[in-house]
Image (cartoon, rainbow, N blue to C red):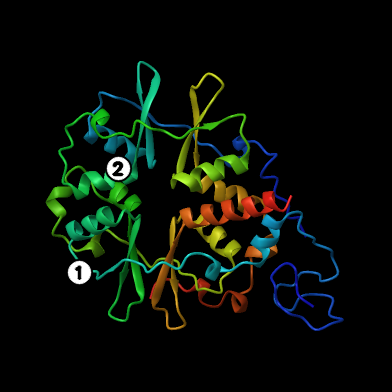
Amino acid sequence: MTGFQLHLTTESVTQLHPVAPLKVDESESLAAVLQKMREQKVGAVLVTKASHMTGIFTERDVLQLMAQQADLTEPISQRMKRSVVLARRCENVATAIKKMAAGGHRRLPLVDANGQPVGMITAAGVLHYLVEHFPEAVYNLPPTERSSAEREGA
Amino acid sequence: MICQACGATNFEGVDQCEACGQSLSQEMVPKSSVEAALRRDVIAQLPMRTPLTSSPDAPLGDVLTVLSTNAIGAVVITDDHHRPIGIFSERDALLRLGPDYRDHLSTPISHFMTPDPQSVDKNTPITFAVHQMDVGHYRHLPVVDDEGRVKAVISIRDLLRYLTDRIAEAELSG
């Protein structure tokens, strides 16, 4: 059986499967940004101005917009979050997980030593990292052991 | 003896776990308390918050308001017996609604939900839930009782908090 060893405090945050960030300009409209998010099926965009990151806009913000029946012609800068919790390339896996859990963030922009965004760390990437390290038998249980875990829907 | 792979109890002298087929003679000592917890813990160890539910006939606009005012990521859509038949999340709002969403605020949520969500129960191993979320790209899993009625929802955030707590315990114990 495969061993089951996590190296949460020694492995780099880059092991968490960072994805390429989708970047949009501050001046783009909400409608245009939503369209890009849908087309590329990404739950968050990094907002930039003159190539510098100035904010983040996520699907949670999209939901708020829709609940408020907001006008989508506004620029994204009016609705983005300007306070962004970052992951740094020098940090380890445990640090990134703690940052996500503490703030309830599902995504952390990954920045290099110069503060430039080079990726996006996601909660889904954390789960995938864990699954990669599970021995197969831990999750691949026979149906009798899963009970209703396999039941789908009603 | 207890199988270290799946937790099933086997009679002494058996070489192979009856439940998962793994060898019982192989030493599998977890390297840290985080790994030990992941081997041991089941869904019941996560916070069992009462889920927000909706009927499939509820208008989209009402469901969006419920999600927004409660600051949660998903509503479970249930049948008359409180069994999950769908889930509507902020992800669905992004991917299934377009810029003309205001034209559909009166449309039943059943038109926009993800049908037949994967469910777990309180005895499901956390590792299994993690695996289901990973392969199915789910962020939420309804937790159902023996009759299939939804009792809670666990989210990917709950799993991150669980991991963080276990990491903190491991650090405290040195």
| B122 lies left or right of B169 | left
- In the image, what residue occupies the spot 44% across and 32% down? A21
Tell me the element at label 2.
helix
Tell me the element at label 1.
loop
Read off the chain for label 2.
Answer: A
- In the image, what residue occupies the spot 39% across and 18% down? A51
Residue that mark 2 sits on: A61
Up/down of B107 relative to B95, above or below: below
Count residues near mark 2 (Cα–Cα under 10 Å), then give few for <14, some for 14-19, many for 20+.
some
- Front residue of A59/A144: it is A59
| B103 lies left or right of B157 | left
Percent position of residue A52, x then y:
40, 19
Query: Residue B57: which numbered mark, if any?
Result: 1
Image quadrant holding the N terminus of chain B, namely bottom right
Q: As shown in the figure, which amino acid type bears the numbered disc 1?
A: Asp
Up/down of B2 relative to B132, above or below: below
